[in-house]
Image: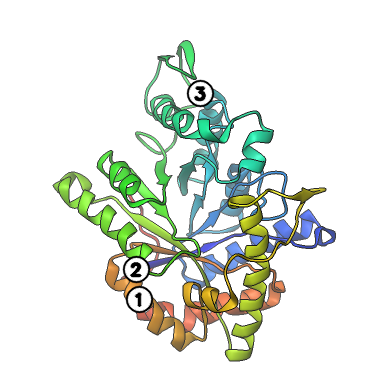
Amino acid sequence: MEFNHFLSSYFPDPAYGGHQLFADMLEQAQAADRLGYRGVTIPEHHLINILLTPSPLQMAVKVASITRHIEVVTSVAVLPIRDMRIFAGEVTQADILTDGRLVLGVGRGAFAYEIERFGVRMEETRAKFDESVEVLIALLSQEEVGWSGEYYNFEPLTIMPRPLTKPMPRMMIAVMNPPGIAACTRRGFHIQTTPLAGKRELFKYQINAHKEAKAELGTKGEHLRIMMSRVTYCAENEAEASDILARAYDYYGRFDNVFTGPGEVENGCILALPCIRSIEELEQNLLIGTPQQLIDRMAEYHEAGIDEYILSSNLGQPQSQHLDAMQRFAEEVMPHFCTSTGVKNAA
């Protein structure tokens, strides 16, 4: 099991400023590169002060320019709000400028608040995503591509320049439900998933769905990876763990507001509604604890066969505290689970 650090751009107080927010993310990326993480992941969200990165490809290029080894993963680029003819060119440019370290994670979008403000109905995103994926793959991997579909109709064209990575940049599909994971695996896609703050058992169903579908493919599926994102924070002691857990309760009050709730936003700031889960439930479902506690709790993730574990640990704590936690995890927890050292290229 290898490890990836999620560059979660969260600023409950907008006075902190976008310049400092993105500077923090870049500093974390450099720390991940230095500490032996396999990669970093970059979210995409718009119009709100949680997970805010309007252009993950721009951030990926910047991260690659100041690091040497890590993979740079989008988690995820939202396809239904884009034109694939433009996006394919942007992906190609990012693939070249990251020297092939880009891993393109794509999804259909999670928050109706932002999706629908771009003129796309949330209930339409599944169908539009499915066609967009096929168009994007064709544009990246082939020349003179024409299309006649529900959302795209165009005469043959060729995206220029062509990608550095052949036949196309690595792609991962973001999907949460186990049947969807199995279906995407059978189609030959790498997988990004998360149980969010769901019950602990959910992640096992997600991993098993991937592993079973991968086994059905035989040798054709041997290269496929599954990445799992969890809120995970390596605390110095119990007191710090309690502080981070309280921050998590506030964070999820905002997250739930736009994910499953009413979408109440003022001047770009998500209102912090009461969290739908209690502190006790969050303590059970999130991985927040001391190094030894994380070693004990993460053993079941390792045994389940996760290829890469994404640590989402930005819950509004100061940057210095965040960097300390990254180093603590790398030095005291990662060695118990890492199967290798250095960065390996996935197929």
Q: What residue is drawn where x is 38% and y is 84%?
A: 296
How far apart, in angstroms, are the residues tagged by discs 2 and 1?
Answer: 6 Å
Residue indicated by mark 2: 1
Q: How many marks?
A: 3
How far apart, in angstroms, are the residues tagged by discs 2 and 3?
Answer: 37 Å
Q: Is residue 53 left or right of residue 13?
A: left
Q: Is residue 205 left or right of residue 39?
A: left
How far apart, in angstroms, are the residues tagged by discs 3 and 1?
Answer: 42 Å
Looking at numbered disc 3 in the image, what kind of residue is underneath it?
Answer: Met
Q: What residue is drawn where x is 55% and y is 30%?
A: 87
Looking at numbered disc 1 in the image, what kind of residue is underneath it?
Answer: Phe
Q: Earlier in the sequence, mark 2 or mark 3?
A: 2
- Indicate whether 57 appears above or below 155: below
On the question of residue 106 being in view, the answer is yes
Mark 3 residue element: loop
Q: Which mark is residue 337?
A: 1
Q: Earlier in the sequence, mark 3 or mark 1?
A: 3
Q: Is residue 74 left or right of residue 8?
A: left
**Residue 37 drawn at (x, y percent):** 47, 67
Q: Which mark is residue 47?
A: none
Q: Camera-side residue: 126 or 107?
A: 126
**Residue 204 drawn at (x, y percent):** 32, 64
Residue indicated by mark 3: 160
